[in-house]
Image (tube, helix red, strand yellow):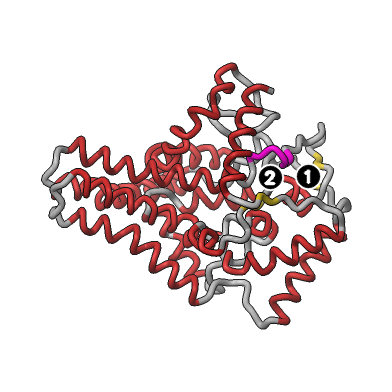
Amino acid sequence: MKNVKFDKVEGAEFSTILRKRVNEYFKENNKTVYGNSKMVIKTVFMLSIFFIPLIIIGTGLISSPLVLFALYITSGFGMAGVGMGVMHDAIHGSYSNSKKINKIIGYSMNLIGANANVWRIQHNVLHHTYTNIDHADDDINAPFFLRFSPNAKRYWIHRFQYIYIWFFYGLSTISWITTKDFVRLNRYKGMGFFKGGAEFRKEILKVLGWKIFYYSYALVLPLIMVPLPALIIVLAFLSMHFVTGIVISIVFQTAHIMQNVDFPKPDENGGIDNNWTIHQMATTSNYSPKSRFFSWLIGGLNFQVEHHLFPNISHIHYRKISQIVSKTALEFQIPYLVKESFFEAISEHVRMLRQLGRA
């Protein structure tokens, strides 16, 4: 991972001009790259969709399994909204110009059962720097039964992954709230992101403490208060995470695991032919650019190209700067990948999973 090097010359002019134009857009329109009142409204809305159903469940007034499942699933959609439209900007540092506010809002990741510090390394550092590079991008470093890159080893079971992938997408946040953070915390320590000894043990205790807090209000309290069998309550809780896992996985995966994106393989010296900006253009795809409401719901992540090029800019600006990016890419004859609808993106994602299973 540390040996991967991008070409600083190839595509340098495009990168320079693109950044200049985007900077000029904010300067000329007297805008800040950070979020505004719209982000505050979205934060309140998404946190409410997540917490209010859990508060209702925690009162113990729910005695119907159907209502219990409905409330947990509603909370699951809220959890996905917090992850995509609130926490995501905050941990990238684009929610506010205040580092303190970004840190506080970033803790919403901990409130939904995962961990902000681990996510920051996995997503901000590894995924955003080494997008679609096998063994470097942690988003495509999958268990043996999943193959997300043509450069990964293929097993016979992969021919069926386009069928069973949805079950494992649904389990993704369940993995986060149980083992994933601890596994990655240990691995990232080995990569030098965390110090060892007492400091590492302190980090583990922090992760554990947040998870205990999350389980306390999201599962333990309902088990105590709700007058229904424990199995029903646990299944309803798992359904919440299954919904969140499906939503988040589809939104993120349809931006990178696609037939028309690149999966660059470093040469023997770790070199990548393009510079970082061109690399992001080649490994990332947009979808459904015309749907404003859909874009609002998923935190602007349908504009993944813009997000990868400018992760320090809040997603509320992506629609506007996408016009600058697409125009500049056309001028330099650089492919600007986009699918007209989310359904089209999902369909191609499925075809790519089938292709990876056969290749």
Q: Position of residue 25 (x, y in %)?
A: 72, 75
- The part of the image, by quadrant, that contains residue 348 is top right
Element under disc 1:
strand
Q: Which residue is mark 1?
A: 5
Is the residue 284 above or below the residue 303 in the image?
above
* Quadrant showing the N terminus: top right
Horizontally, residue 193 falls left or right of residue 166, namely right
**Label 2: how many residues lie within 10 Å, few (<14), some (14-19) or many (20+)?**
many
- The part of the image, by quadrant, that contains residue 258 is top right
Magenta stretch, overall SS: loop
Amino acid on which the number 1 mark rests in the picture: Lys
Membership of 65 in magenta stretch: no
Residue at left offset 83%, top offset 66%: 17
* Quadrant showing the C terminus: top right
- The part of the image, by quadrant, that contains residue 54 is bottom left
Give the CA distance from mark 2 to mark 1: 10 Å
Of the pair 201 and 25, the residue shown nearer to us:
25
Residue pushed farthest top?
156
Q: Earlier in the sequence, mark 2 or mark 1?
A: 1
Numbered range of the magenta stretch: 257-262
Q: Mark 2, mark 1: which one is toward the viewer? A: 2
Residue at left offset 14%, top offset 53%: 60
Q: Position of residue 49 (x, y in %)?
A: 34, 60
Element under disc 2:
loop
Q: Which residue is mark 2?
A: 130
Residue at left offset 81%, top offset 62%: 328
Q: Position of residue 189 (x, y in %)?
A: 54, 41
Q: Position of residue 297 (x, y in %)?
A: 48, 60
Amino acid on which the number 2 mark rests in the picture: Tyr
**Label 1: how many residues lie within 10 Å, few (<14), some (14-19) or many (20+)?**
some
Of the pair 238 and 123, the residue shown nearer to us:
238
